[in-house]
Amino acid sequence: MNRPDSILNDVPPVTLFGRIDRASWGWLHLEGRERCPFLAGYLPSLPRESFHPSIATSSGRAALEAGFQTYKIIKRELRKHGRPLQPADAVLDFGCGWGRITRYFTRDVQPENLWGIDISETAIEACRETNRWARFEQNSPLPPAPFEDETFDLIYAYAVFSHLSEASHLAWLQEFERVLKPGGLFVATTLPRHFAENSSKLAHRDPGSLPEWQRQVAECFAAPDEFLAAYDRGDYSFAEIDGAEDDLGFASISEQYVRRRWAERFEVRDYFPGPRNMQMFIVCRKRGQPSNV
């Protein structure tokens, strides 16, 4: 005879935890898993510790806390703009990494409706190993994405548009307009202006003392004046990493640029700094009315 907990292991988090409050949901991930080992059967796990440095600047609890903060901001924006999630809604985490944000949305939507895509095969493997309550696929650096028109109610991209060239970011905006439902929200982040100013200080440090991503930053912003001038003019501010594949680098997209270029495809609803001013949040809505209105 099966034990009750083994039966519950097949019940998705949206059914088990969908009615608990947000603070309790965060506690389960940040504290509960360590204090109550049985929760490992019901919640996504963490990737192997050796995995983190390859795709993230933080790991473990720090990364989970940052992911939860982002989750709370996105949920707040959904309520603010009249699009609270329902279990049947579809959500896409674009550039999901190892799934530090995706895991929190398992409380909100059914597993078949929660997607994460990333260009990193290693990241997707980690997501599949640690989170059976969502669907993960590797995507190409440029569109198309493997989805039908008007699939998603919410698309979010944390710290992805912080690294795309202008051509790449415009291509993905067009693609998100295609796969987002009318009235759906798109939430993205970009680097703030002061990132270039602060990063220029790294150029004066010994490169051997810096982790790889900081060495890249130091090289890109040894002379940040051109980057900052483009930002202040309302142009696209992008510093390409030498030798990087797919034209990746560091991007700061000003509000002026967003309200001019992004407004060609979306209603621009908000632009504001995130926690500790590490990223600027951009909130857009696809024009048109939801099918259930």
Image (cartoon, rainbow, N blue to C red):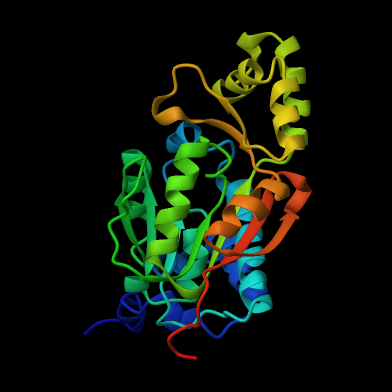
The answer, for residue 98, to whether it is visible in the render is: no
Residue 146 relative to residue 25: left or right: left
Total marks in image = 0
Res. 9 image quadrant: bottom left
Measuring from the top left, give residue 281's x and y in whole percent: 67, 54
Seen in the picture, residue 11 relative to 59 is either above or below; the reply is below
Residue at 71%, 44% (x, y): give it: 278
User: Where's the N terminus, which quadrant?
Assistant: bottom left
Looking at the image, which residue is at 55% across and 58% down? 264
The answer to whether 240 appears left or right of 177 in the picture is: right
In the orientation shown, which residue stands out farthest toward the left?
1
> Please, is residue 105 above or below residue 69 in the view?
below
Q: Which one is nearer the viewer's eye here, 29 or 69?
A: 69
| Rendering coords of residue 195 (x, y %) | 73, 33
Q: In the image as oriented, which residue stretches furthest toward the bottom?
A: 293
Q: Position of residue 227 (x, y in %)?
A: 69, 26
Question: Residue at point 49% right, 76% down?
Answer: 108
Residue 183 seen in this snapshot: yes
Q: Quadrant of residue 43?
A: bottom left
Measuring 71% from the left and 22% from the top, which residue is drawn there?
Answer: 226
x and y percent of residue 95 in the render? 45, 48
Question: Going by the image, does 258 lie left or right of 245?
Answer: right
In the rendered view, tell whether residue 291 sits above or below residue 106: below
Task: State left or right for residue 43 relative to residue 35.
Answer: left
